Image (spheres, rainbow, N blue to C red):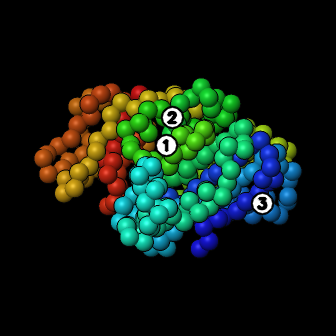
Amino acid sequence: MERIIGKYGPPQSDTLIICIGGMHGNEPAGVKALEKVFEFLYKHRPPAQGRFIGVRGNISAIQQGKRMIHEDLNRIWSEANIKLARESPTLHSPEITELNQIFKVLDEIPFAAYKQKIFIDLHTTSGDNGTFVVANEYDNAKHLFESFKVPIILGLDQQLESLAIHYFIRHGFISFAFEGGLHQAAQSVDNLVWGIWTTLAQSGLISPVFFPDLSQTSQHLHQKFSRLPSILHLEHLHKIHENDQFKMKLGFKNFDKVHYGQLLAEDKNGPIYAQSNSYLLMPLYQTQGSDGFFLVK
């Protein structure tokens, strides 16, 4: 697998959009979505007012269908780890080596040359109904998010350390994660494709008159999420520690309403209850991962 999925548009321009798919190897929908978008761009060659670059994330984990090989690639974007990745990648974990290869792409891009910079991290979830955006803030990205038909989750990234979106924020990007839905669902690919095209349109990089027909996905998202609040804030994160024996109760979906005191999961210490009346987000139904569930309001 090549690291770069595609590049499109003039390098000398005002707008730069970088998109990573497959940060977790068991989330192939992001890579497939980028492949579909670039296939259309290369075939139809619409005029572009900016540079769009798509990158594969954890290639080793993608090839094995695992979330990660040794550590979570989306939790190691600290300046210290980036320094390790640039200087001595083979002396550390497979994910540090992956980070080295990603930065061979990123370091060739003159970030400072662009006035508008956007980063999208494409993901999916192990719980159903999980299409939403995780953003650092709303106001500076309002021109993008107002056209999204999915909930915007604020504050969640602040509870997680060393994310890719944090790195790009430090370098002046509007930076967010787009969650497409269930890991292996075909609809998740369509949702992510819709999110990419919407960002291309709202950023002014490509005019919607040149887009493929996205009406079916647009209608699907409207029907699924129009009754939910457009903006939600993190209320609680249940972290999982090694040997916790965490097990989520079966049957939960993203955005299920839960009430205070409701049984959500169990671990070696006993039952785990909801701490508030809220919406459930990203219930963990996979063996790898350190976040049991989130509650948002």
Q: Which residue in the structure is indicated by mark 1?
A: 166
| Residue 237, x across and y down, in percent | 32, 38
Marks 2 and 1 in Cβ contact (< 8 Å): yes
Determine whether 223 is above or below 289 in the image. Answer: above
Viewer-side label of 2, 3: 2
Instruction: State the residue in front, 87 or 67.
Output: 87
Viewer-side label of 3, 1: 1
Viewer-side label of 2, 1: 1
Residue 106 visible at all:
yes
Disc nearer the start of the sequence (3/1)? 3
Name the residue type under label 2.
Asn
Question: Does dot 2 land on a helix, a strand or a loop?
Answer: loop
Q: Which residue in the structure is indicated by mark 3?
A: 40
Q: Residues under labels 2 and 1: Cα distance?
A: 8 Å
Q: Residue at x 42, y 55 (%)?
A: 81
| Residue 100, x across and y down, in percent | 51, 64
Q: Residues within 10 Å of mark 3 (few under 14, many from 20)?
A: some
Q: Which residue in the structure is indicated by mark 2?
A: 136
Q: Residues under labels 3 and 1: Cα distance?
A: 30 Å
Question: Does dot 3 land on a helix, a strand or a loop?
Answer: helix
Q: Residues within 10 Å of mark 1 (few under 14, many from 20)?
A: many
Instruction: State the residue in front, 205 or 256.
Output: 205
